[in-house]
Amino acid sequence: MGLSCPHCDLSIEDELPRLTESAQILCPQCQQPLTLPEMTIPISIVDTPLMGAPRQGLDPGKKYALLIVSGEEAGKVLNVEKTVVTVGRSGCDLVVDDPELSRRHVRVEFNGTDISLKDLDSTNGTYVDDQRISEVALDNRSKFRVGSHEIALVITDRDN
């Protein structure tokens, strides 16, 4: 795409990123903003999962929490405020001090009413009803075990 800076008349031939019809970048020579022309998105791209309907995420009328119900850290609660949370020994949303957990052990994804639990290739596994799982759907009050800890998903109505 060719573009000329309206301030210094620099001709820019490089392919520039275009995010919206009003997206702006700075001229490499005078540092003044350049307004990019409107971008037409082919219909085939719009229909892809990444560009299609947005994920529903968390229901604003509900509160979500992960509660450790047994193990050395019983009583610890993570109030869930985002659509993907991780549980593990370090660098996770819910950090559990348990040598049987992998650093990043399991992930919980919230997509409207669909909530899924996915083991992140942990060494010692994730268990639901004493069955090792790789991925499973969760409901309110569902419990899963990681290491020596049992964790419950708790969903309640948000006070208005």
Image (cartoon, grey):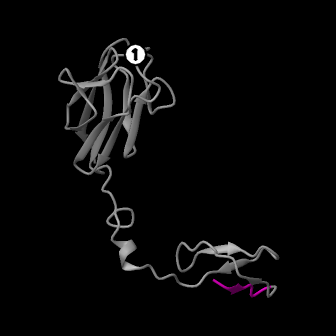
The image position of residue 51, as x and y in percent, is 39, 67
What secondary structure characterizes most of the magenta part? loop
From which residue to which does the magenta span run?
1-7
In the picture shown, does residue 138 fall above or below 38?
above
In the picture shown, does residue 82 fall above or below 99?
below
In the picture shown, does residue 42 fall above or below 54?
below
The amino acid marked with disc number 1 is Glu
Q: What's the residue at 32%, 57% (across, down)?
A: 55
Judged left or right of residue 19, residue 86 is left
Q: Which residue is mark 1?
A: 100
Mark 1 surroundings: few (<14), some (14-19) or many (≥20) residues within 10 A: some
Judged left or right of residue 35, residue 142 is left
The image position of residue 85, as x and y in percent, is 39, 38
Judged left or right of residue 39, residue 131 is left
Evaluate whether residue 159 shows in this view.
no
Q: Quadrant of the N terminus?
A: bottom right
Q: Which one is in front, 137 or 154?
A: 137
The image position of residue 33, as x and y in percent, is 71, 77
